[in-house]
Image (tube, rainbow, N blue to C red):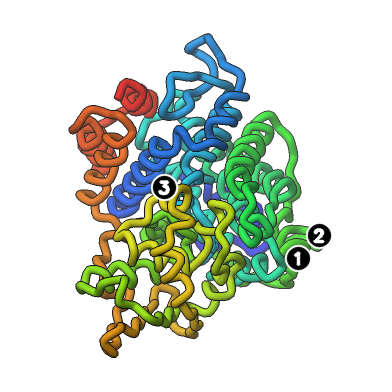
Amino acid sequence: MSDTTPMMVSPTQRLGIFAVDRREPLPLPVAEKAAMCLLDALGLAALARNEATVQALRDIASPVHDTCLGARVWGVNKRVSLSEAVTVNAAAVHALFQDDNDVPSWSHPASLVTPVAVTSGESVDASLSDVLRSLAVGYAAMTWLGAEERVARALIQRGIRTSPTLGTIAAAAAGSSILGLSEVQAANAIGIASSITGGLLEPVRSGSDEWRLQNAHAARGGLLAAQLARTGMQGAVQGLDGPKGLMRAYAGLDHVPEWSHNPKLESILAVWAKPWATLGDNVSAVAAASALRDSGVNPADILEMKVTIWRHYAEYPGTGYAGPFDSVAQALASTAFGVSAMLALGELDYSVSVKRRKDPNILRLVHCVTVEPHDGEWHEATIEAKLRDGRIVQRTCADGPRELMFHQPQTAVALFEDRLRVSGSRPGVGAALAAQVFEVAQGHAQMSIRKLVDMMELA
C-alpha cells in the first residue's frame, strides 16, 4: 500500500492493510535485523526459563499431548495450547527486563511481537522467512503506533505503560501477518486489539511484580485479536482514532499526523538491544559507568557522582528511586542502582538485582549519586566522578562500544551462543543455530520455524 492511499482509510485500516502486504520482499538489512531481534529474544527466554513468574505460568499451562496440536514452551519439553505458549514465551523474553527498546513507542517489541510471530508460525508450519516478515511487521507497527513519541509520551503522562498498551496492537499486526489474514480481517484484528489493550505504570513505579505479566498478557491479546478476526469477528473501524478510540480515550490526543502515513519496515533498524538487565531508561547511564570503570577508576575512591541523563528518562517512574531496594523491580528500575552496580561489579545481569541489592559496596555508591536531567538526545549520558585525590573523571555513553546496543550479525551470533551455553547447551550449538538463521535471512537457505524450535529444544 502506498502513502497515496485515500485518506478515508482510517489508521486502524491502514495498519491492517500494511500488516498483510506482501508485494515486496524484505530488504536485506531489515531481514538481518529481524534475525538479530529473533536471536536476542530467544536467547533471553532461554536465560529466564527458571525465573519464578515464568515457572509459575509454565506450571499452570495445561499440556497438550498430541504433537500435531498446540505449540512449544521455549526451553522446556512441554507443548501447550497456542495462547498459553505465547503467554509463557512472552513472559520469558520480558522476565529479565533486558528485551530490546524502540524509542518512538517507548516499548519493548521483542516480548510482544516475537512470541506471536514464532509460536503462531509454529502452529501453521510457517517458514522462518515468513516469521521474520511477521516480526518486522510487528516491530514496524510498534514504532508507527508510538508516532515519534507523541502517543507514547502522552500515554506515559497519564500513567499508562506503553509496552502492553501499544503492544497488543503490534502483536495483532504480527499475528495477522503470520496467520495469513486478508486486509479486511487484519483491520478487524487491529480494531479488536485496540479495544482490549492497556497496562499501568504503577508496578514499575512501586517495584511490584505485575509488569512481568503485562507484556505476556498483551502478546496473548494480540494473538486472540488476530484469531477472532480470522473467524469473521468485526473490530471497530476507528479503534485507534475514533471519538472514543485509543488516541483520544487513552492518550488524550485529538490528532496524530504520523498515522496518516504508512508504517515502515525499515524502522526496525533503529531498535536497540539492552546489554544489561535494567530499565531501558538507564542503559545510556550504565554504559557511561562501564566506560568509567574501564578507564581504571577504583570504585572505592569515588566520593561523589553526577549522572546526567535525558530528562524524559530522569522523570520516568522508578528511575529516581534510590533505596532501600526491597524488591527486584526497584533495583531494576533505579538509575542510581544500575550505575553503582556496574561500577562496583563490572557487570549488571539479572542476578545482581536479585542477589546483590543489599551489597554495601553498591549501596555506598548509590548514596554518592546525584541525577541531573538534560534536554539533548535520548542516548546522551555522562558520569562525572569526584575521587578521593581530588580528581574529577568523566565518561559518556559514547565512550562505550556501539555494538553493545546495535548488534552486528557476529555480535548476535556470539551472544546467542553464550546465552544458550549458560542455559545448558553444548558449546557451539547456539552459534551453529544462529548461523542458520542468518543464512535464511540472507536468502541463502530455507527452513521452517518448527525445525528451528525443534533444534533449540534438542539443544
Question: Which of disc 1 and disc 3 is earlier in sequence?
Answer: 1
Q: Residue at x 49, y 83 (%)?
A: 372
Question: Is 199 located above or below residue 115 in the figure?
Answer: below
Q: Nearer the viewer, residue 12 or 437?
A: 437
C-alpha separation, residue under disc 3 versus residue under disc 1: 41 Å
Q: Quadrant of the C terminus?
A: top left
SS type, badge 3: helix
User: Which residue is pictured at 52% across the width and 72% down the height?
Assistant: 313
Q: How many marks?
A: 3
Q: What's the residue type where badge 3 is placed?
A: Ser
The residue lying at 58 percent from left, 55 percent from top is: 326
Q: Secondary structure at mark 2?
A: loop
Q: Which residue was labeled with disc 2?
A: 244
Lower sequence index among marks 2 and 3: 2
In the rendered view, would you say 374 is above or below 282?
below
Q: Is residue 159 above or below residue 353?
A: below
Q: Residue sitting at 33 percent across and 44 percent down?
A: 35
Residue 168 visible: no
Secondary element under disc 1, as helix, strand or loop, is: helix
Asked if marks 1 and 2 touch (Cβ < 8 Å), the reply is yes
Which of the two marks, 2 or 3, is nearer to us in this view?
3
In this view, 99 is above or below 131: below
Looking at the image, which residue sits at the far right?
244
The residue singled out by tag 1 in the image is 248
- Say whether marks 2 and 3 touch (CB < 8 Å): no
Q: Residue 425: x and y, percent?
A: 27, 29
Q: Which residue is mark 3?
A: 351
Q: Label 1 is placed on what type of residue?
A: Arg
> 10 Å neighbourhood of mark 1: few (<14), some, or many (≥20)?
some
Judge by depth and name the residue closer to the eye, 141 or 279. Answer: 279
Q: Residue furthest top?
A: 66
